[in-house]
Amino acid sequence: MDVFENCHRISRRCFVRRLATVGISFAIGGLPKPALANVPTVAIDATKLEGNEFEVTVNIFHKGNNIFHYVDKVVLFADGEEVKVWKYSWRRRPESENFSAKTKVSVTQKTVLSLVANCNLHGENKDKGRLVLSLGSVSK
């Protein structure tokens, strides 16, 4: 039995529905693309302020920033403890694919800062970003 044997019997209405379904599928998903998992990349920098206080700048680089694909959470850790959390949603996304945020951190001893950024589709970065703060200096 030939698969196309009954093709001439498809009604115009059925054909239009099938064509519309295919068109809508391409409009929503676009043309098929290779799957490129894109987890965020992070970097930490700090500037010494007065006393034992530092201004810490976190930089996040992530390809894709739209309502379906964005960084939804950034967490700064000091010696493994959460210091600051930035949360984002599809309505309140980061301003661009590459963005920065700042916070102040006080240290009383040598402290290791690390950073985790999470993509809502692809998960968190494996390279946590690392910066060492001591009372007199900043080192990577």
Image (cartoon, rainbow, N blue to C red):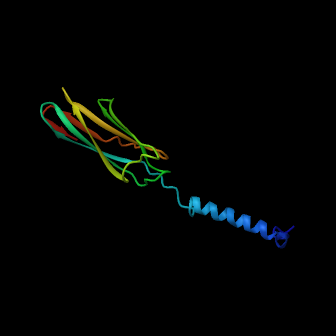
At 15% across and 38% down in the image, what residue appears? 48
Image position, residue 9 (x, y; %): 85, 70
Residue 36 picture location, percent across and down? 48, 55
Question: What residue is at 23 percent from the left and 31 percent from the top?
Answer: 111
| 98 relative to 10, above or below | above
In the image, is residue 68 above or below residue 32? above
In the image, is residue 92 above or below residue 112? Answer: below
For the C terminus, the image quarter is: top left
- Look at the picture and state if 100 lies above or below 7: above
| Image quadrant occupied by the N terminus | bottom right
Q: Which residue lies furthest to the front in this view?
A: 91
Numbered disc total:
0
Relative placement, left or right, of 131 versus 8 is left
In the displayed image of the protein, which residue is found farthest to the bottom?
A: 8
Measuring from the top left, give residue 119's x and y in whole percent: 44, 45
**Residue drawn 52% across and 56% down?**
35
Q: Which of 16 and 97 is in front in this view?
A: 16
Residue 79 in the image: state x and y as whole percent: 29, 29
